[in-house]
Every structure is written in C-alpha cells, then in structure tokens.
Amino acid sequence: MMTVRILLVSLLLSTNIAAQNRIQISPKPVSVKENPGEFKLSSETEIVLWGGSLKQEAVYLRDYLNQYFQLNLKIDSSGKSKASSRIVLNYDRLDHPFPGAYNMTVKSDEVYIGGDNPSGVFYGIQSIIQLLPSKAGEIPVIPNCEIQDSPRFAYRGVHLDVSRHFFPVEYIKRYLDYIAYHKMNVFHWHLTDDQGWRIEIKKYPLLTEVGAWRDGTLIGKHPGKGYDTIRYGGFYTQEQIKEVVAYATSRHVEVIPEIEMPGHSMAAIAAYPFLSTTPDKPKKVAKGWVNYGDYEYNNVLNPSDTTFKFLEDVLTEVMELFPSQYIHIGGDECSKRWWKESTFCQKLKKEKGLKDEKALQSYFIQRVEKFVNSRGKSIIGWNEILQGGLAPNATVMSWMGTSGGITAAKKKHYVVMTPGSACYFDHPQRANDDSTGLGKPVLIDSVYAYNPMPKVLTPEFQKYILGAQANVWTEYIGNTSKLEYMLFPRLAALSEVVWTPQKDRSFSEFKKRLVKQKERYEMWGINYSK
Ligand code: ACM
C-alpha cells in the first residue's frame, strides 16, 4: 500500500515537472492547466477571425510564424472557415478592471484565444509564441492546455533615453517588439536632455539643427578621461515619429513622449539661448555627464512668458504626434541656483507671492499642466514635481525610492513606480560587472523581489498605483548590443512583477523558466546578460 502511494506521488510529481517543461510562459499566467496531446501547426492551419477588428493581431501572428517557422498561414476574416486545423481569435467577456485579459484553449485541432479586447487577444498570441519551440525552424507544436490570464497592473512601462545616445528608428522598432514580447504596454521615450534634442519641431528648427548635435562625448565613466572630438547626434523627423507610434500601436504599446523641463534643458538652450536665465553666456550641447548636484551648469529654463510660449508651441506639435493621454514633462533634478541668481526670477517670485524656488518650480509645472490639460491631455513627471506643491492633475513617476509615489498616492494622484534599486537598468547587473554601469548594482533578484504596491497604502489609495517601469538611461550605453545586455534578462523579471499576481510569484521557479526565455532571446537575436 505504502509503495503504491509513493509511486503515485512520484508519478504526480513527475507529471508536474513535465508540465513545467512543456508550458513555460514568462510572465507567468494567472492560471494554467496542461492537457494531454498537442496542436501541430502546418501550412494547412488557418487563422480564423470570429471577432471583428482583429486583422492586425492575425497579421502579427502570421508574420511571426513566417519569420521563425517558415509558415505562411491563411487568414480567414469571414470567420466561416471550416479548416481542420485552426487558430481562432475572438472576444470573450472577461471581468477585469482594465484591458489585456484573455482565455486560451489549445486542443489538438484548434487553438482558441478569447480576449477582452484586441490587446487581450494580442497577449494570448504572445503566450502562443512562448508555447512554440524556443528554437527557430523546429517543428511548431503547442501543448494542449487551458489558460486564463490577465495583467496585475494597467501600466507596464519600459523607458529609453535617446538623448545621451541616439538609437535609429529601425532599432526603436525592435525595442518595441521586445516590449511587446514581455506583455509590457508603455514605451516612455526620453526625447530631450542636456546631451541632445531628438525630436523635430517644425516651428523651432534649431532644436534639431543645433540641439541634436554635440562636439564630442565623454570617454569612460564620469569624471572620465576627457572627451573625444567626434561630432555626435541624430534626431527623429515627425514622419519617423508617426511611423514609430503606428508600429507601437500595432503591438498594443502606448508611446509616452518626454520633453524635459525646467532642468535638463541644455540642448534646447544651446539652440535658443533666450530660454536661459543667462542668455548672454556661451551655450553648448553637453558632451557628457552633468553634475547636477554641484549646480555648475546652467541647464535650466527661465520661467518667462517667452519660454512658456516656446513650450506651448513645442507641446502642441508633440501632442499632435502622440495619441497618448500622457505627456511626460520631466521635472527632475532642476537646480534652483540659477533662479536664485536671476533678477527676473526673484521679481517673478515676489509678484506671484511664491515662497521659494521650489514654489517657483511648482508654478512652472502648474502653468504647463494647465496648457496640456486645456488640450485634453495629462502630465506625468518625475517625483520632484511634488516640490512646492503638486500640480492638481499630475501623475507622479517615483524614481528616488518609493516615498514620492506613496505621498502622491495618499494625495489621490496616480503613480508609476520606478525606484532605482529595482527599476534602473542602467545600473550594473552584478558587482564587478564587466560593463560600465551607473551607481549600485541592480541584480535580477532585486528586480524580481520588487512589489510595486507599497504595504503602507490602504485599498482606498492602492488604486492610484498604476504600475511600474524600467528606466534605461544611456550615458554609458552607446550601442544596441550593450543596450540589450543591460535590459535582458532583467526585463523578464520586471514583466512578471507587473503582470503576475504577487501570491503566485517565486524567484526560484522563475529562474527555471528563464532558461527557455534565454533560448528565445537567442532566437530573437538578443544580446542578453548571461
Ligand atoms: C532621473 O533618473 N533623473 C529621473
């Protein structure tokens, strides 16, 4: 009797292990049940649309299968196909508070995906991609299973700084593919900073003629070994921006543009010195790391009517290009020294009854918010926008730890968490990393261990935590190979942080799934950190 029980237990255990081997989806779905058998894709398989407006998702799946498995499947938009092997895309009513939920059933003759809307269907397709072999050209079979899945957070972001180093449109599209593969849904595009202005603005051509180029770049890690003398730069035309937004939209990724203000504005000031509190001093696009703490460097916008007119013009063009509800207005690391030293700013402060320079910063952000709100959009800014009083409708991106985010949530403002210790992917992946990074290591363990929902928040305030984001600052990331090394596999860990229910997460189990994920990275041509 005893032996039989032991046998049974070990049989059950081994089936479990087998299930783990066959179904290895990252981020881990909410619920997975494996069934015997498998669905084999062939050139006879059809993608059948039962739900309307799912052509884009079908084309995405067809193109993926074509690229990696040389299968060019027929898409049946009529929904009437009687094909004996089919992948059905449809809608199911699913009770989830925000988009992205889906049900999936794989049987030997049919894969069925029912999404709550097209993004849910798209995430079902991502799960199919992960059920397929992780090596290109292998026989495309999918294990029979039933999956119910939905994202934990509505905001699942990945950022990229294209100012410190520039990445061309073709690569931005790849980056968007990577975001989508991980079921992330926001691309925060850091388009302007001291080291380069990267978006064409028709009304102010010097922003890109002058502001997109620098005369050299810091060699090595700050303070560095001097500067090279290679002219460096680049920018995106408005046509290219539209192309990127369309590409992102087809992958259910929202693109949030960031236009930095009032600090981090050296490139804009170099193009248009009238934006500065010291317009008569020489201005140059920064060549390397700027030591914000020392306040040596006047990269701050003057809060004058001329500056606000400039910003309104710029933001008008930006808002026409990006359908996103959010415009990121930066707001971080603005030195107050230059406003303290400016007669104009001191006069303005008195006139407006502002207590100090922090209040002046709040005045600045609130004025910009009013304009953005008047165009039906909302601002999001780094946690320093809390200084001197938060703009009434602003969303806060908490990067200096999580306290700014907690404060904002308690004031009933929406929050995106991106604390340095878990979400800064410009930091090294480990101690003694062979690649230059900024600050302390952010191990994949710390990324995985992060829970964006602060324990101190009661349910009333928890709903203000929208999600979390990985930040990829590129001071020391000069090429795409290094960029991928910094991003992967930490992004896999963060995707599970923002997708999978907290109670279902286990780092040791995630690490087992990571083996397959790394095989996929190789198939996709990603240079991940080993
Ligand atoms: C930041 O890292 N300065 C937002």
Image (tube, rainbow, N blue to C red):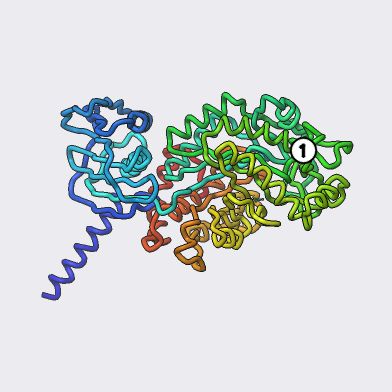
Q: Position of residue 149 (x, y in %)?
A: 32, 50
Of 125 and 528, nearer the camera is 125
In which quadrant of the rendered view does residue 44 lie?
top left
Of 493 and 153, nearer the camera is 153
Q: Position of residue 2 (x, y in %)?
A: 14, 75
Q: Residue at x 72, y 27 (%)?
A: 204
Q: Position of residue 310 (x, y in %)?
A: 72, 33
Q: Position of residue 488 (x, y in %)?
A: 50, 47
In which quadrant of the rendered view does residue 137 lie?
top left
Q: Residue at x 50, y 59 (%)?
A: 452
Q: Residue at x 40, y 57 (%)?
A: 510
The image shows residue 416, relative to residue 324, as above or below, that is below
Of 4 and 383, nearer the camera is 383
- Asked whether residue 398 appears in the rendered view, the answer is yes
Q: Residue at x 79, y 42 (%)?
A: 302
- Asked whether residue 135 appears in the rendered view, the answer is no
Q: Which residue is mark 1?
A: 305
Element type at mark 1: helix
Q: How many marks?
A: 1
Amino acid residing under circle 1: Asp
Query: In the drawing, does residue 12 fall left or right of residue 296?
Result: left
In which quadrant of the rendered view does residue 206 lie?
top right
Which of the image's four quarters has the N terminus? bottom left
Task: Report the residue that reaches farthest toward the left.
Answer: 1
